């Protein structure tokens, strides 16, 4: 009787097990790399109805975020500006530019400019801008260097882990009140050392929620 | 077995070349890993959020305008001095409304608000040389001429609230209280530009190198 299986088949079960381990490892790496917000969201930069540039208006002209996102200190929602806000200047500067046709039409008729929302948390998450901005957290922590962007793109993952990284140790992320809208400013910790950050968090009684009900209410 | 590893390797290379690396820019809405149709949950709740789209209202907005001839609770504005800048006899108010306390805090607030909303055009000194002048907005006046130095506070209030010819209104951005704070700061800018050595208290002159 001849051998049906060659001798090397004895090693096969072991080789299959090793292969499966490699495969599961690869699959895990693939899922963590490709199925988390760092891949799915970061870099999202939709085509906007008006090619508005933060790099020009904020970086070059030096406008403050609050000139346009004017309710951010009172409201949980960061409002986009009205068409009139643009017309404050564009009724005199570049007043016939074809790029601004949508804005002029909106100003005249009262129709909305169809801006596309970029950052969006799922509806089961409660997020509030005012509590962050008034308590020493700058826009740059969550949105990146908007003042250098020609087109706004999603820069941070805004995943639960991202929120918690800061909520667990805010002292590394807080800024002086005067620096919050200046996206190039350093944090207190980089400017005057970690102790200064810890002291600020203590003096201001900053206690970001870490319990589930803080953000899932 | 070699072949199996080779095939796996090529599949991995294929996946990386199709999906690319992290950090690329794209214009399509982000993929949802657990899409709502397959994993119904609470990601997209049927609720209205500010400035979002509505399929119900004809103009397609969730934010509703205030109906004509109605006033929101707590928004009944009866104090003409505070909300219109008008004195009891209907003329522009000179000085500040009684309900505003003029102090250093109001000045600091005025400085901050002025820097955000007015300085881009009127300049940090109020001389009309804000950044926009370089881009062709020549119409912005300086605050330091005689007419604007003598103008009533109430009229400046009215300019902020309703705008004036080339300047559009700022009522939606600056609350009435902040408008008075800005006016206080404008007044201090005017004072500073027209100050003389005599305005500096004698014991502080040496600090500034004045005689």
Image (cartoon, coloured by chain):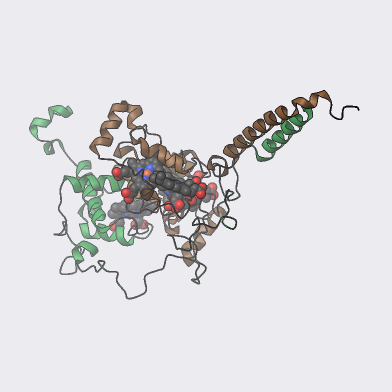
Chain colours: A brown, B green
Q: Is residue A190 above or below residue A82?
A: above
Residue A215 x %, y %: 39, 49
Q: Which residue is drawn at the image coordinates 30% and 60% (left, top)?
A: B161
Q: Is residue B112 left or right of residue A61?
A: left
In which quadrant of the rendered view does residue B49 lie?
bottom left
Can residue A73 be seen in the rendering of this structure? Answer: no
Q: Where is the C terminus of chain A found, in terms of image quarters? A: bottom left
In the foreground, B111 or B146: B111
Q: Is residue A199 above or below residue A120?
A: above
From this viewpoint, which residue is outermost toward the right? A1
Q: Is residue B57 left or right of residue A173?
A: right
**Number of disc labels:** 0
Q: Where is the N terminus of chain A found, in terms of image quarters? A: top right
In which quadrant of the rendered view does residue A87 lie?
bottom left
Q: Which residue is drawn at the image coordinates 37% and 60% (left, top)?
A: B165
Residue B103 x %, y %: 15, 48
Can residue B69 be seen in the rendering of this structure? Answer: yes
From this viewpoint, which residue is outermost toward the front? A1
In the foreground, A55 or B158: A55
From this viewpoint, which residue is outermost toward the top? A7
In the foreground, B117 or B190: B117
Q: Is residue B88 left or right of residue B17?
A: left
From this viewpoint, which residue is outermost toward the bottom? B69
Residue B50 x %, y %: 42, 60
Q: Which residue is drawn at the image coordinates 27% and 61% (left, top)?
A: B158
Residue A114 x %, y %: 52, 59
């Amino acid at each position: 009787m001849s051998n049906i299986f060659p001798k090397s088949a004895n090693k096969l079960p072991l080789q299959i097990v090793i292969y499966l381990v490699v495969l599961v490892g690869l699959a895990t790496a693939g899922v963590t790399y490709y199925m988390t917000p760092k891949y799915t969201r970061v870099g999202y930069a939709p085509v906007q109805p008006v090619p508005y540039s933060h790099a020009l208006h904020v970086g070059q002209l030096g406008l403050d975020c609050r000139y346009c996102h004017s309710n951010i200190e009172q409201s949980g929602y960061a409002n986009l500006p009205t068409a009139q806000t643009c017309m404050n200047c564009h009724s005199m500067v570049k007043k016939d530019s074809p790029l601004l046709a949508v804005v002029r039409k909106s100003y005249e008729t009262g129709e909305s400019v169809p801006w596309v929302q970029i950052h969006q948390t799922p509806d089961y998450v409660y997020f509030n801008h005012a509590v962050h901005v008034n308590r020493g957290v700058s826009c740059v922590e969550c949105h990146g260097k908007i003042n250098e962007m020609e087109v706004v793109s999603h820069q941070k993952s805004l995943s639960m882990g991202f929120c918690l990284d800061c909520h667990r140790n805010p002292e590394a992320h807080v800024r002086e009140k005067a620096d919050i809208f200046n996206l190039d400013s350093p944090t207190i910790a980089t400017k005057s050392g970690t102790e200064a950050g810890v002291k600020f968090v203590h003096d201001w009684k900053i206690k970001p929620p870490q319990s589930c009900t803080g953000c899932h209410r | 077995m070699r072949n199996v590893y080779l095939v796996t390797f090529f599949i991995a290379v294929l996946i990386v070349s199709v999906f690319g690396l992290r950090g690329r820019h794209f214009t399509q809405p982000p993929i949802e890993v657990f899409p709502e149709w397959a994993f119904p949950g609470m990601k997209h709740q049927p609720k209205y959020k500010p400035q979002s789209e509505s399929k119900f209202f004809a103009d397609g907005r969730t934010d509703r305008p205030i109906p004509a001839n109605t006033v929101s609770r707590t928004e009944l504005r009866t104090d003409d001095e505070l909300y219109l800048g008008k004195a009891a006899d209907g003329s522009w108010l000179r000085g500040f409304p009684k309900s505003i306390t003029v102090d250093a805090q109001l000045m600091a607030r005025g400085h901050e608000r002025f820097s955000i909303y007015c300085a881009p055009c009127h300049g940090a000194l109020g001389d009309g040389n804000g950044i926009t002048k370089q881009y062709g907005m020549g119409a912005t006046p300086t605050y330091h001429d005689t007419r604007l130095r003598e103008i009533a506070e109430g009229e400046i209030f009215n300019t902020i609230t309703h705008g004036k010819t080339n300047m559009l209104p700022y009522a939606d951005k600056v609350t009435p209280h902040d408008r008075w704070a800005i006016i206080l700061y404008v007044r201090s800018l005017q004072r500073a530009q027209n100050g003389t050595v005599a305005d500096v208290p004698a014991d502080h002159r040496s600090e500034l190198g004045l005689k």
